[in-house]
Image: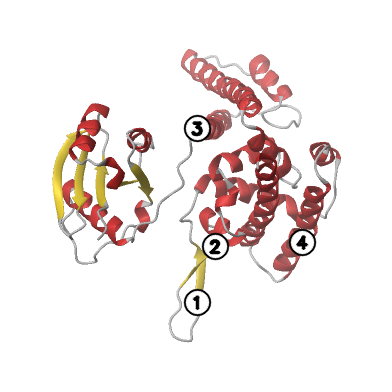
Amino acid sequence: MSKVRFLGLDVHADTIAAAVAEPNGEVRQLGIIPNRLESIRKLVNKLQPVGSLRACYEAGPTGYVLYWQLTALGVKCEVIAPSLVPTKAGDRVKTDRRDAVKLARSHRSGDLTAVWVPDAEHEALRDLVRAREDAKQDQLRARQRLGKFLLRHGKRPESTMKVWTGKYMEWLKSKVHFEIAALEATFLDYVHEVTHQAERIEDLEKAIDAAIAAAPAQIRAVIEALQALRGVAKITAVTIVAEVGSFSRFENPRSLMGYSGMVSSEFTTGNQVRRGKITKTGNAHLRRVVGEAAWAYQRRPWVGGFLRKRQQGLDQEVKDIAWKAQTRLHSRYTKLTGRGKNKNQTVVAVGRELLGFIWAIATRTEAKFQKQAA
């Protein structure tokens, strides 16, 4: 008879509710402890031997700190996808203790789905990339506020110029002024915020360059190889790698597509097969950058100056996959738009197939390094 015990943890910022599922079928609550390393260590010591313990908790805002703490104490731990935890339709009572019991029972029965847990270095890279993404969103909001402010007060350049260029910013600082002190103060604050966000993005991109240079050789190689694809420049490539981690953990491209949430939802019953909108149940950051990259395939296949520069020094096999992606995805875009498909729907379909080419390049690059290591 198995002697493995399953520990369910409902984790919050300050507290952890714990329950254990015993091998004989009993599931008992262990109470609520502070979310502190010393309290976690005491709980693990009470449940000796550690080798027979299997812990789990739901992924959430507390991150992976508890996972690393339990692993350091010798406990095998899994972080569970919250949206895939089984629930009873008629259950209307939800407490931390009951959630811990449910996790322990479901873990014992094998009904939980674990998520991939990055190591500390990989999570640091992902946080840095997401910080740049936040800065870009803040920059967009700052520009919109300034643009609408100028529009309300009728301030426009005398000659046609592209907004937010160096020339446009020079016009703002030298030609735009307000007689009323309150308006002048508002204008200067908006301009300062736009300038600050641009400097913030520049600093973060320098930090990303330094992080890439300090990353393991395999990660650097995958980032460089992905840039062979049209629409996938450095920031897009490093975002994809930071969000996905190891591509080899996906058995096939379809699994990666499902992880991105770009696959169609399905409502099938009997002989009727109905497919709807994309699920959006995957990684939103990955879905966003791949969707942006997919717009590049509306143009005819071509290896221009910037793309040719990114492909220098790469394996011919990677270049061949990238060229195949250009020809196939452009053809796909043309056919779908020719059939009257909405452009946004077309780009989603192209982005989904682009993930297949991303998987092909990344797994080949990873396999090359694994072979060298062996």
Up/down of 79 relative to 24, above or below:
above
- Closer to the observer: label 3 or label 1? 3
What colouring method underlies this structural image? secondary structure
Left or right: 39 as drawn, with respect to 184: left
Q: Give how far apart the Cα atoms at labels 1 and 4 are.
A: 26 Å
Q: Where is residue 13 in the image (x, y as percent from the top left)?
A: 27, 34
Q: How crowded is mark 4: few (under 14 residues within 10 Å), some or many (20 or more)?
A: some
Disc 1 to disc 4: CB gap under 8 Å:
no
Left or right: 289 as drawn, with respect to 68: right
Q: Where is residue 350 in the image (x, y as percent from the top left)?
A: 67, 59
Up/down of 245 relative to 177, above or below:
below
Q: How crowded is mark 1: few (under 14 residues within 10 Å), some or many (20 or more)?
A: few
Q: Where is residue 180 in the image (x, y as percent from the top left)?
A: 50, 15
Q: Nearer the viewer, residue 196 or 304?
A: 304
User: Which residue is the site of mark 3?
Assistant: 127
Labels 3 and 4: the sequence-earlier one: 3
User: Which residue is the site of mark 4?
Assistant: 328
User: Which residue is the site of mark 1?
Assistant: 274
Up/down of 170 relative to 19, above or below:
above
